[in-house]
Amino acid sequence: MQLSVLSQSAREQGLAFLLIGGHAVIAHGHPRNTFDLDLAVPRSAVEAWRAFVLARGYTIHREGSTFIQFNPPDTLSLPLDLMLVSEETYRQFEAAAVDTPVSAAGLRMVCLRHLLALKSHAIRHGHAGRIEKDLDDVIGLVRVNRINVADPNGETSSSNTDRPNSMKNSSDSNGKIEPETLDLPDWSRADDGSTRVSPDAAFALCEQYAAEMPELVKKLRAQRPPPCPVEFVL
């Protein structure tokens, strides 16, 4: 089942969710392959989500107190991972969420600031097998969005203001980012989606990227910046 179909059905059922993970990384400007669907959902909605996903032929792969991972119903669908967050954290995610590209209209995803927070959390607390991928995501997002890492407010350059992923809170008239406390749980026991996807689904997804996001692909190619050094202190 494609992300657009799944998300439309979820919205019709009134289920809260925001796109995170690899698809959000791509939509925020860093093109790469991803072989699962990652959604952030409020912990209070877990039972409704479980029933919704199982009714569509998915089966539970692994479940913990902070996540549920589902195996796909067929060889052309991708694994689905639900990352459970507290009501307050989801409220902060939702308040700052942005739209996905036009070709994926109707979806909402976490803002760039929160996506970087999620990736940094995964680097610090995730399992060793994912560190390289998450670090590459952070570096790629910083580069393509031209984030000034020396600025504590994480401002983007004026040449990149057309992108829907500002690092500022829209409510801040002075441009300052108010401190946030995100309760990000331990997801280190979750399996990587690439180990659960079929070759058919992986090849089909790679072929679909350029076709399904033409305006994003064109913009990314035009905005690709030169290499730059980035240093992180964890």
Image: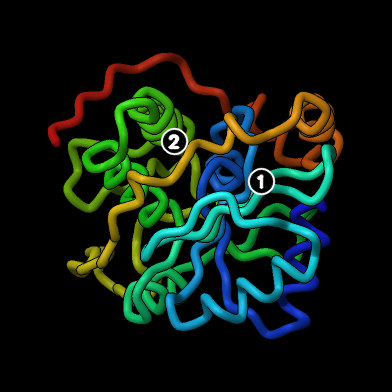
From the viewer's perspective, is residue 10 above or below residue 229?
Answer: below
For marks 1 and 2, give the one nearer the viewer.
1
Task: Measure the C-alpha gap from mark 1 to mark 2.
Answer: 24 Å
- Its colouring scheme is rainbow
* Residue that mark 1 sits on: 79
Report the front residue among 87 and 68. 68
Q: Which mark is residue 190?
A: none
Q: Is residue 64 left or right of residue 53?
A: left
Dot 1 alpha-carbon crowd within 10 angstroms: few under 14, some 14 to 19, many 20 or more:
many
Q: Which residue lies furthest to the left in this view?
A: 233
**Residue drawn at 55 percent across, 65 percent down:** 18
**Residue drawn at 33 percent across, 44 percent down:** 188
Q: Is residue 157 left or right of residue 29?
A: left
How many discs appear? 2
Residue 90 % position (x, y): 41, 74
At label 2, the amino acid type is: Leu
Tag 1 near tag 2, CB within 8 Å: no
Report the front residue among 175 and 45. 45
Report the front residue among 29 and 53. 53
Q: Which is nearer the N-term, disc 1 or disc 2?
A: 1
From the viewer's perspective, is residue 146 above or below residue 117?
Answer: above
Q: Is residue 211 left or right of residue 142?
A: right
User: Is disc 2 placed on a helix, strand or loop?
Assistant: helix
Q: Which mark is residue 141?
A: 2
Residue 99 % position (x, y): 62, 62
**Residue drawn at 36 percent across, 54 percent down:** 113
Q: Residue furthest top?
A: 227
Report the front residue among 120 and 191. 191
At label 1, the amino acid type is: Pro
**Residue drawn at 20 percent across, 68 percent down:** 181
Quadrant for the C terminus in the image: top left
Dot 2 alpha-carbon crowd within 10 angstroms: few under 14, some 14 to 19, many 20 or more:
many
